[in-house]
Amino acid sequence: MQPDHHNLSPYKTQLLTWPEARPEDMLRAAQRLASRSSRLPVPCLLGLDHAAIGVKDLKRSLAWYHGVLGLRHMFVDDPMFNGPIAMVGVNDIPLLALLRLPDNEQPLVGSREQRGHFALRTKPEDFETWRESLPDLLRLHRAHDLQSLWLEEQDYGRQRSLFFQDPDTNEIEVAAWFR
């Protein structure tokens, strides 16, 4: 049975594979999808809701994120946001979901590009205070002997950033925009 290449909906497509599909069939299918999708409304996004990161010990991470970054445990009485998950944030705005890693899983390892990072914004006038305070905060709240105290500053012209790691090697950026 041959797939129907002429009736592809933008939501459910059939896979066109060689030798079943000729290049011209694939091109026509792609053009139909593009013309249909350009008529679909794109809903509005308000912004980033939160980032989710894996941690080995929720209690330790809650203390570290509060001590170093001032993030508070949110939704403490909500059973949906307790147990293997804890939400932390500022000014009643959740920023991070701390997800307890299963016992048999380790935090992400690898290059900065492979692991990724999340960035928290600060005011330009507060950046110097972060720059001066962060080394001491990292030392004071060091959760274990193997925790890195690495700190890197980057100046991107309009943005300045400080990079460092939490107790589970999740990379964090504190950034300020100056222009």
Image: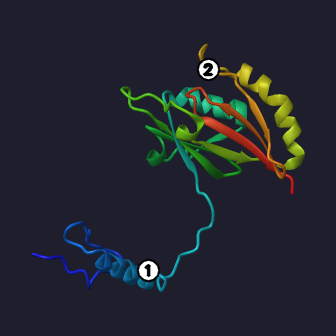
Q: Residue at x 40, y 82 (%)?
A: 31
**Residues under labels 2 and 1: Cα distance?**
49 Å
Q: Residue at x 65, y 46 (%)?
A: 89
According to the picture, the residue beneath numbered tag 2 turns out to be: 147
The residue lying toward the viewer, choosing from 99 and 131, is 131
* Left or right: 130 as drawn, with respect to 9: right
For residue 150, what is the image quadrant?
top right
Front-lying residue, 149 or 14: 14
Residue 45 drawn at (x, y percent): 59, 69
Which of disc 1 and disc 2 is earlier in sequence?
Answer: 1
Quadrant of the frame with the C terminus:
bottom right
Relative vertical location of residue 43 with respect to residue 74 in this rendering, above or below: below
Q: Residue at x 86, y 48 (%)?
A: 124
Amino acid type shown at disc 1: Ala
Counting from the top left corner in percent of width and height, residue 127 is at 85, 41
Q: Can you tell which of label 2 and label 1 is closer to the viewer? A: 1
- For disc 1, the marked residue is 34
Q: Is 65 located above or below residue 30 in the figure?
A: above
Q: Nearer the viewer, residue 44 or 13?
A: 13
Neighbor class of circle 1 (other Cα within 10 Å; few <14, some 14-19, many 20+) is few
Query: Which residue is the extreme one toward the left?
Result: 1
- Quick check: 2 left or right of 7? left
Q: Amino acid at mark 2?
A: Gln
Q: Position of residue 54 (x, y in %)?
A: 49, 36
x and y, in percent, of residue 114 in the image? 53, 39
Label 2 CA crowd tier, 10 Å (few <14, some 14–19, many 20+): some
SS for dot 2: loop
Q: Residue furthest top?
A: 145
Q: Secondary structure at mark 1?
A: helix
